Image (tube, rainbow, N blue to C red):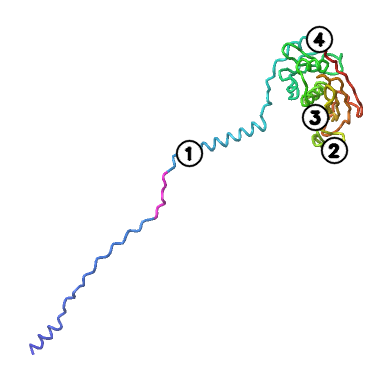
């Protein structure tokens, strides 16, 4: 009996539980907040930005200068000869820079002088100075030709004719245009303006025709002053202008400006001149 109890007690005595070892936890990487990637600063950023600002300001100033404040171009002109100041009929005027006149006499100084009083029909005249010689134009035009030009060619004869036209109209010589066709005359839609195309049969390129001992030259010219359209004919014999004929084709042609200070020529009128010959 006792043995049975011992056996039961042995069976009912609790046995200590055997704990299984817990494997060590695997360390997880710590989660950190994402940080923005910082880039190294560009050391040239500020200088470049400053340069661009200066460039923009400089461009704006230049634009304003040339748009609103640009001064008129000052052209240095040669000294007007003293003889223009000493004469009783004229006073010193401006030097003329006209390519045709330069081609006529490259070492001549052409200048315009204004008359004093009403002794003569024009308000101004043209003079040319070469070395110590002064020529009053157009009255001494042939004298200048003989002393400066030994032999005239076709091309030179055309330059001579154009130069004579310029010095014959000193009051508006800078505006005279030698035309080859109607398209050379500026036009406008203003009321009262005559379109140059209606004179297409009268407007022609300059013509130089060989003649005995010289040339005949025909030129059409236009001036915005009163819109004068005229034709000129020259007889150049022995290196001198022997005869000049001018015919007023019409006035008020093209984009013209009325001359309120003088009377406009009469259309259709013709004038023939014989410049003094130089022996």
> Which stretch did the figure color magenta?
34-40
Secondary structure type for disc 1: helix
Q: Which residue is mark 3?
A: 178
Secondary structure type for disc 3: strand
Q: Are marks 3 and 2 in contact (CB under 8 Å)?
A: no
Q: Quadrant of the N terminus?
A: bottom left
Q: Quadrant of residue 9?
A: bottom left
Q: Residue furthest front?
A: 212
Camera-side mark, 1 or 2: 2
Identify the residue at horizontal 32%, vertical 59% (top origin): 29
Horizontal placement of 110 versus 262: left or right? left
Q: Is residue 105 magenta?
A: no
Secondary structure type for disc 4: loop
Q: Quadrant of residue 8?
A: bottom left
CA gap, disc 1 and disc 2: 64 Å
Magenta: main secondary structure: loop
Q: Are marks 4 and 3 in contact (CB under 8 Å)?
A: no
Q: Residue furthest left?
A: 2
> Disc number at residue 197?
2
CA gap, disc 1 and disc 4: 71 Å
Q: Which residue is mark 1?
A: 46
- Residue 193 vs 35, above or below: the answer is above
Earlier in the chain: of badge 1 and badge 3, it is 1
Q: Quadrant of the C terminus?
A: top right
Q: Which residue is mark 4?
A: 88
Q: Nearer the viewer, residue 210 or 62?
A: 210
Identify the residue at horizontal 87%, vertical 22% (top origin): 244
């Amino acid at each position: 009996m006792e043995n049975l109890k011992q056996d039961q007690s042995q069976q009912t005595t609790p046995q200590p539980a055997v704990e299984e070892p817990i494997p060590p936890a695997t360390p997880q990487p710590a989660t950190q907040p994402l940080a923005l990637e910082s880039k190294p600063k560009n050391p040239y950023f500020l200088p470049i930005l400053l340069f661009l600002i200066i460039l923009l300001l400089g461009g704006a100033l230049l634009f304003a200068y040339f748009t609103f404040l640009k001064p008129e171009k000052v052209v240095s002109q040669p000294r007007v000869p003293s003889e223009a100041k000493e004469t009783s009929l004229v006073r010193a005027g401006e030097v003329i820079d006209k390519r045709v006149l330069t081609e006529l006499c490259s070492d001549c100084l052409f200048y315009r002088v204004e008359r004093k009083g009403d002794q003569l029909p024009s308000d101004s005249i043209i003079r040319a100075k070469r070395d110590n010689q002064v020529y009053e134009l157009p009255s001494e035009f042939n004298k200048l030709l003989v002393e400066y030009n030994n032999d005239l060619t076709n091309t030179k004869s055309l330059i001579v004719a154009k130069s004579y036209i310029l010095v014959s109209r000193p009051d508006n010589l800078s505006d005279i245009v030698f035309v080859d066709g109607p398209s050379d005359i500026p036009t406008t839609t203003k009321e009262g303006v005559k379109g140059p195309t209606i004179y297409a049969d009268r407007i022609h390129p300059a013509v130089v025709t060989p003649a005995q001992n010289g040339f005949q030259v025909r030129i059409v010219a236009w001036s915005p002053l009163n819109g004068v359209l005229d034709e000129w004919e020259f007889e150049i014999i022995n290196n001198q202008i022997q005869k000049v004929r001018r015919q007023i084709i019409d006035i008020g042609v093209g984009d013209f400006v009325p001359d309120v200070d003088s009377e406009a020529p009469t259309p259709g009128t013709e004038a023939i001149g014989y410049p003094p010959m130089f022996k």
